Amino acid sequence: MGHDHLHEHNHAHGLGHHHEPPKLDHLNSAFIWGIVLNSAFVIVEFVAGILTGSLSLLTDAGHNLSDVASLALALLAFKMTKVGSNSKYTYGYKRSTILVSFFNAVILVVTVGIIIYEAITRFINPEVVSGSTMAWVAAIGIVINAFTAYLFVKDKDTDLNVKGAYLHMAVDAIVSLGVVISGVIIYFTNLYWIDSVVGLLIGVVILRGTWGLLKESLRLEMDGVPKDMDLTKIKTELLKAKGVVDIHHMHVWALSTTENALTAHLVIAPADLHLFDNIKQDLRHRLQHLDINHSTFEPEFANEKCDEPDC
């Protein structure tokens, strides 16, 4: 029998309630607020770092600048997902969200390297800094970063870029708290090497918070199975559909940070071939509950031998 490829998109088709990828349109204002507030804080922190000679403030300003770039790129990626498909990009620009999440993670890792290098250099040759100015500026950072993180907390588990934005802001709030503490210590003790130690700790904290984001974004960039998706569970669920004898040659990957896709060979009994449309709708419905919004099925008869190597 000739194989028939059937590309199924995210429609209910009279199957009752269904799962659609999160729109996240309401996050536009959250990203804009985050960009504006953090841009203003970067300027304040950079000027204060220059005036006081504080490595902690300068490195944190550099990190916050990368956060501004990350927020701007994430917002751009969300805008690009709204662009329709065309003859050159048949899925549109959905994958830009994955590219941006990976790029942001790489930026953070590079930033950490610079911070650690500067911290070690300044630890060997500590410089006099103003502890009180450090503390006051960083205190402002706590408020701004905590507020920005709050804007993303509700949706942090729906999208990798939103999760990245939330983690950046939450970590920044903690880092700013560390700078406040080091500023107070320096003010009362004049132990200026504390500034370098805090700069080093900032780098470690950022790296720890970024590593998971880097691994997951790289996995999606390489068309790996999205996190928390179990192929065995997916296959077990699909085999529950009436008329499906077996499933093989199954592939699952991410179209974007919010949409996933699947292709598979369906083995069905010859007597059930006339029910294939109903089988597809049932399978599509089951997949939507597993957060898979696009599916392509290739039917085979149960008595037919598959020539594909993965069968």
Image (cartoon, helix red, strand yellow):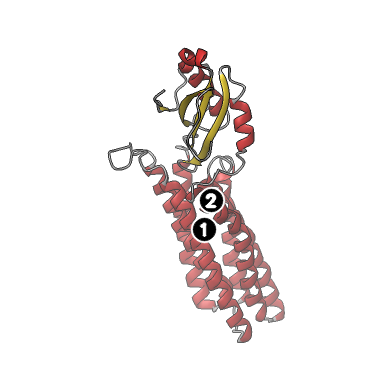
Q: With respect to residue 126, does 220 lie above or below?
A: above
Q: With respect to residue 310, does 205 lie above or below?
A: below
Label 2: how many Cα within 10 Å (few below 14, some 14–19, many 20+): some
Please provide percent x and percent y for residue 157. Answer: 59, 41
Question: Residue at point 45% right, 41% down?
Answer: 255
Q: Nearer the viewer, mark 1 or mark 2?
A: 2
Question: Residue at point 60% right, 87% down?
Answer: 125
Q: Helix, strand, or loop for circle 2?
A: helix
Q: Of residues 144 and 154, which is closer to you in this image?
A: 154
Q: Which three-letter amino acid code belongs to the residue tagged 2?
A: Arg
Can residue 167 be seen here? The reply is yes
Number of dots carrying numbers = 2
Q: Which residue is mark 2?
A: 219
Label 1: how many Cα within 10 Å (few below 14, some 14–19, many 20+): many
Please provide percent x and percent y for residue 48. Answer: 51, 72
Q: Helix, strand, or loop for circle 1?
A: helix
The image quadrant where one finds the N terminus is top left
Lower position in the chain sequence, tag 1 or tag 2:
1
Q: Give the alpha-carbon distance from disc 1 to disc 2, as whole Å.
A: 12 Å
Q: With respect to residue 209, does 186 lie above or below?
A: below
Can residue 64 be seen here? The reply is no
Q: Which residue is mark 1?
A: 105
Please provide percent x and percent y for residue 95. Answer: 42, 45
